[in-house]
Amino acid sequence: MGRRLAATRPGLLTIILPRHPERGGALAETLRGTGFELARRSAGEPLRPSTEIYLADTLGEVGLFIRLAAAVMMGGSFVPVGGHNPLEPALLGRPVLYGPLMESFAEICARLEADGLAEMVADEAALAAALARHLETPAPAAGVEPSAAARRLAAEGQAVLAGVLAEVDHHLPTEQRGGRGAG
């Protein structure tokens, strides 16, 4: 699929953000074995006009690379691992694409889809078509305010987490209550 898109878009750069940056070496080896021109961030390899894949295998830079993308394809969504959290790219104003195996985030995906922030793609052909569409009409520039729908969804998750933490805190001895004392 990458070659198909690249053939119609000279200079296209795919950025891969591995969930576990420590696996960058093995991933780089695999990608180089497919014949793609690759630059690896953690190794300080420079981007060149011929670079097709930028492997951003570093910590703390996810937001930067998400903001640079026309769309974000969620990893782990075409293999049976349950997918990865699509909320971060949605909060950063980027369209989210994901495969059919997002069981761990099914509710979030359904809500993002209902608000037009995400799209399930069934296979490689649908993914290529969706990416081509987003490359034709890219998302607004970086720094754009995230959608109200994504902010609302994140706030709901934060409220649930706060409630869970408060309940756990309530059952801890006073001296272990997160510095808040008796509650």
Image (cartoon, helix red, strand yellow):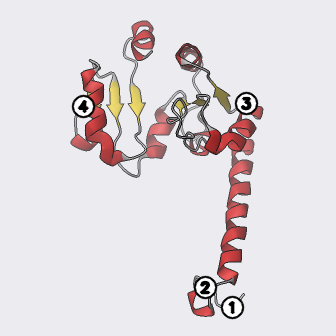
Kind of residue at disc 2 = Arg
Name the residue that disc number 1 marks: 182
Q: Earlier in the sequence, mark 2 or mark 4?
A: 4
Q: Earlier in the sequence, mark 2 or mark 3?
A: 3
Name the residue that disc number 3 marks: 116
Marks 1,2: beta carbons within 8 A: yes
Marks 2,3: beta carbons within 8 A: no
Mark 2 Cα-neighbour bin, 10 Å: few <14, some 14–19, many ≥20:
some
Kind of residue at disc 1 = Ala
117 lies left or right of 16: right
Q: Position of residue 148 (x, y in %)?
A: 74, 44
Q: Earlier in the sequence, mark 4 or mark 3?
A: 4
Q: Earlier in the sequence, mark 1 or mark 4?
A: 4
Residue 170 found in image quarter:
bottom right
Alpha carbon of mark 1 to alpha carbon of mark 4: how far? 54 Å
Give the label, 1 or 4, closer to the camera: 4
Kind of residue at disc 4 = Glu
Marks 1,4: beta carbons within 8 A: no
Mark 3 Cα-neighbour bin, 10 Å: few <14, some 14–19, many ≥20:
few
Name the residue that disc number 4 marks: 29
Give the label, 3 or 1, closer to the camera: 1
Name the residue that disc number 2 marks: 177
